[in-house]
Image (tube, rainbow, N blue to C red):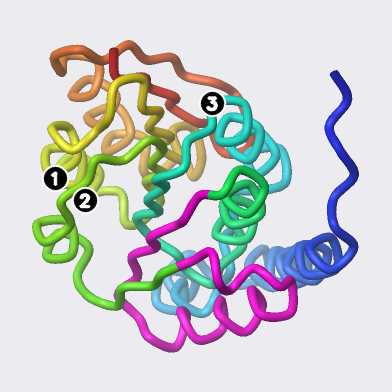
Amino acid sequence: MRPEPMDPAVSAVLADYEARAEREQEIWSRRSADENLRRRDEMLLPVGRAAGMLMNLLIKEGEARRILEVGSSYGYSTTWLAEAARTIGGKVISLELQGAKTQYAYTQLERAALADFVEFRVDDALASLRQLPGPFDFVLIDLWKDLYVPVFELLHHKLSPGAIVVADNMLFPEEFRAEARAYRQRVRAAAGMSSVLLAVGNGLEVSRYQ
């Protein structure tokens, strides 16, 4: 079954994000590792088109209407999630610590006519998760890697039957592989979870709650 063509407004926003990411990658490659670490919050660091398309399809095919994004950043992945939510009548709750990033993301969602399908919560992710009741049908985890396991601990019992949890950056950047490995070990040991590592984008752990 061929996917339907993407709305031109959404396509334009995604193309702008991807052009920005390409420019930033060139800058990243010229700077020192220390400078990149200091300035990483300025960078888009998106999941990439392949990961975005996969998540968009998983949401639509599974009719996962209650969507949670842990780590909005500048809103690239939010756009993919929101487009899927609009198609199936769902809603995205997106958590982000920095209000400036959320404002940027909201502006892009307005351009794509997707703003009505996203609710942003600006706060510490763990604090927000403690307040959210769930259940969630689809979750994307994409924030600082040392928080992946604490995030999953709070999420595990808020998943609906058949829920999908996607964690980004399981393979790249390489400096976070220890944290990625710790997350994979935890999610695979959790009751009711089945999980697989996919070499898509920066590496995705895709887990399903039975």
Which residue is tagged 2?
A: 147
Asked if marks 2 and 1 touch (Cβ < 8 Å), the reply is: yes
Secondary element under disc 1, as helix, strand or loop, is helix
Q: Position of residue 137 (x, y in %)?
A: 37, 35
The magenta region covers: 90-118
Which residue is tagged 1?
A: 150
Which residue is tagged 3?
A: 62
Q: Is residue 108 left or right of residue 186?
A: right
Q: Quadrant of the C terminus?
A: top left
Q: Which amino acid type corresponds to the residue marked 1 in the rendered image?
A: Pro
Q: Residues within 10 Å of mark 3 (few under 14, many from 20)?
A: some
Q: Residue 27 versus residue 48: which sits nearer the camera? A: 48
Q: Is residue 167 left or right of residue 60?
A: left
**Marks 1 and 3, how far apart at CA:** 26 Å
In this view, 30 is above or below 51: below
Secondary element under disc 2, as helix, strand or loop, is helix
In this view, 193 is above or below 134: above
In this view, 99 is above or below 47: below
Q: Residues within 10 Å of mark 2 (few under 14, many from 20)?
A: some
**Marks 2 and 1, how far apart at CA:** 5 Å
Q: Is residue 16 left or right of residue 209?
A: right
The mark that comes first in sequence, 2 or 3, is 3
Q: Which amino acid type corresponds to the residue marked 3 in the rendered image?
A: Gly
Q: Position of residue 25 (x, y in %)?
A: 70, 63
